[in-house]
Image (cartoon, rainbow, N blue to C red):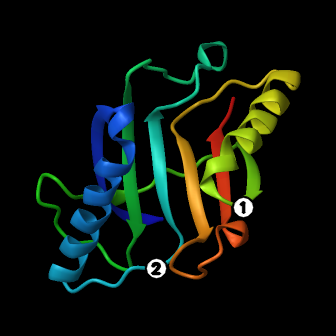
Amino acid sequence: MLVASVRKVFAKKGFDENLEKMWPTVNEYIDKKGVKRTIPCLMLYHSGWWNLEQWNVMYDEQNLDVEVAEPVTKPFEGNGEVNVYELPRVEKMACIVHNGPFSTISKTCDTLFEWMKQNNYLADGPIREIYHKGEWATNNPDEYITEMQIPIK
């Protein structure tokens, strides 16, 4: 999948404020270049909320390393802040679908992590959070559909 993205490391307490800037940055640049977006948009957690060192997931107590990404229809040149690249193909992925608001997604993630543990899998890349249905499609957070994907080995 070809994506245009913005990646940033920031303090966890500034999560919402940073995302409110990152999404418009990538989308405005895509529009400026006259390229069309496709679906679904996603985020990649290069280091995240979860302390999963036993599964090879990077963790930082205070900071997040997050990338917001929009699939695009054709390649174009990035600008240093926005990067355009092909999201790497993954041979083996652990996936789970979360139905409902983002505020309850951690329980769904815990289920996925427990499955990985029980089946002796290690993470092998950034966690992908894929947005199939969100605020752009419904005013009801209970109707959100989010897929979590973790490359595994």
Residue 17 horizontal/vertical position (percent): 30, 50
Q: Which residue is mark 2?
A: 38
For marks 2 and 1 on the same chain, the one whose residue lies earlier in the sequence: 2
Could you say which is closer to the camera, residue 132 or residue 38?
132
- Label 1 packing within 10 angstroms: few (<14), some (14-19), many (20+): some
Q: Judge from the rendering whether residue 75 lies leftward or rightward of residue 1; answer left or right.
A: left
Viewer-nearest of discs 2 and 1: 1
Q: Is residue 91 visible?
A: no
Which amino acid does the dot numbered 2 rest on?
Thr
- Cβ atoms at labels 2 and 1 below 8 Å apart: no
Q: CA distance from mark 2 to mark 1?
A: 23 Å
Q: Residue at x 66, y 68 (%)?
A: 144
Residue 83 horizontal/vertical position (percent): 24, 56
Residue 37 horizontal/vertical position (percent): 39, 79
Q: Judge from the rendering whether residue 45 lies leftward or rightward of residue 110; answer left or right.
A: left
Q: Quadrant of residue 46?
A: top left
Q: Quadrant of the C terminus?
A: top right
Q: Judge from the rendering whether residue 33 lies leftward or rightward of residue 137; answer left or right.
A: left
Q: What label sits on residue 100 in the rendered view? A: 1
Q: What is the secondary structure assignment of the residue under circle 1?
A: loop
Return the residue found at the far right. 118
Q: What is the secondary structure assignment of the residue under circle 2?
A: loop
Which amino acid does the dot numbered 1 rest on?
Gly
Q: Is residue 116 above or below residue 19?
A: above
Q: Residue at x 66, y 20 (%)?
A: 55
Q: Residue at x 34, y 53 (%)?
A: 19
Q: Is residue 79 above or below residue 74?
A: above
Q: Judge from the rendering whether residue 86 lies leftward or rightward of residue 5; answer left or right.
A: right
Q: What label sits on residue 90 in the rendered view? A: none
Residue 14 horizontal/vertical position (percent): 32, 39
